[in-house]
Amino acid sequence: MLAVIAVHCNLMPSGWAGVWLFFVISGFIVTRSLISSHPYPSAINLLKNFSRQHWVRIFPVYFAYVLIGGLGLLILGYQINPIAFFSLIGFFNNLALIFGVGDLNPWPSSHLWRISIEMQFYLIYGCLFFLLPLRWTIRILALFVLLAPLGRMGLSLELADLGVTTKQAAYAINLAPLVHFDSFSLGALLAFYGSKHSIRKIALPLSLLGLLAVALCGLVYAGIHAHAQGYVDPSSIQNVFSGVLAGQLKEVFLYSALAVFFTGLTGLATSRSALTHWLLGNRHLQWLGNVSYGAYIYHALCIKIAVVVIMGVSAEFSNATLTDKLLVFALTVLLNLAVAGLSFRYLETPINRYYHHKIYQY
């Protein structure tokens, strides 16, 4: 979450990777909640568990943010793009953004594409889990891990044939449905593995494999950039991980390498490895983790407020100095944690407790 704020404050070009860490963690936690009532849960109990652990966690904050934004725009006399609004409500905002009609301007909402991709995955995954034998669900998840990079490659080549610019193609692939299911699937497969075996055994090797893959991608593409420029400088490496992945099929390989690395990190975290527990065992950081979903939802609005406070109403953030960017980042984090903390305490937690009580009452 902090990495995503940093990239949107123009401070950390590779901060976008934080979203893919969200994807892996989401797949792991949702799957672990689904299989927690095994060995022989009924379909209705699975559905209840799935709803309580995921939908009830995701929907209240998300819909509150979208509906408050839409209502506020109407009250202030703005024209709302109906496609943008309904794409947010219907979880196809990533597709609307690809075609340039997904923004609920001036209410910041373009960061919510991540929720649309998440819901698209769980619509398919939920059907698989509830309708198919478990062994087939696991096999299909493994197939997603293999097919998603091929989907990114096919989409990249097709867009190039259509004459789409490299940056436009990279943006479209970044937002496209289906082609990032490998990250969710790896998290889910880790949870399935952990239900039968010790995750501790594979967490470190998986982390090292992913780190090696990321480093290899960095070296290869830095070499490609340096060869194209005719010389070597820091930008050769920086441009490999900056912004959306563009050119030379980086979007095929680097997303996959990061997904493996983040799966290993998730394994280290959940197995309480000494490599991570010294940090993740801190109760203050655990609180930060609890509120991080709400912080992600609210962060774009907090950035907008921080820019006005630090630079003025008419200022262009694209022209900000490093000092301004750092001040905006610091104020955004403070505002964001305050809002997300209040949201977690007075909105998310009461709703989750109420739904939890209703399930057991039923």
Image (tube, rainbow, N blue to C red):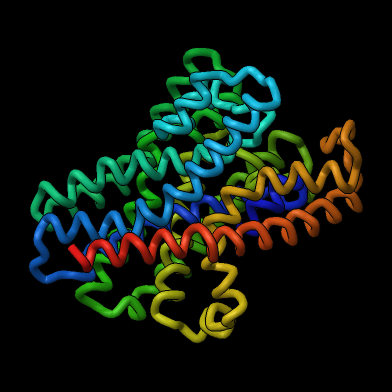
Q: Indicate left or right for 142 with 289 as reference.
A: left
Between 228 and 32, the one lying in front of the other is 32
Q: Position of residue 18 (x, y in %)?
A: 57, 54
Q: Quadrant of the C terminus?
A: bottom left
Q: Quadrant of the N terminus?
A: bottom right
Q: Indicate left or right for 205 with 275 as reference.
A: left
Position of 116 relative to 156 (above/below):
below
Position of 83 relative to 294 (above/below):
above
Kindly identify the residue that appears in the image at 23 percent across and 73 percent down: 195
Q: Position of residue 94 (x, y in %)?
A: 48, 31
Q: Is residue 153 visible?
A: no
Q: Position of residue 154 (x, y in %)?
A: 39, 28
Kindly identify the residue that appears in the image at 76 percent across and 45 percent down: 10
Between 109 and 353, the one lying in front of the other is 353
Kindly identify the residue that appears in the image at 74 percent across and 61 percent down: 334
Q: Indicate left or right for 150 with 131 as reference.
A: right
Within the image, what quadrant is residue 110 found in? top right
Within the image, what quadrant is residue 243 found in? top right
Kindly identify the residue that appears in the image at 61 percent across and 59 percent down: 340
Q: Position of residue 54 (x, y in %)?
A: 35, 55
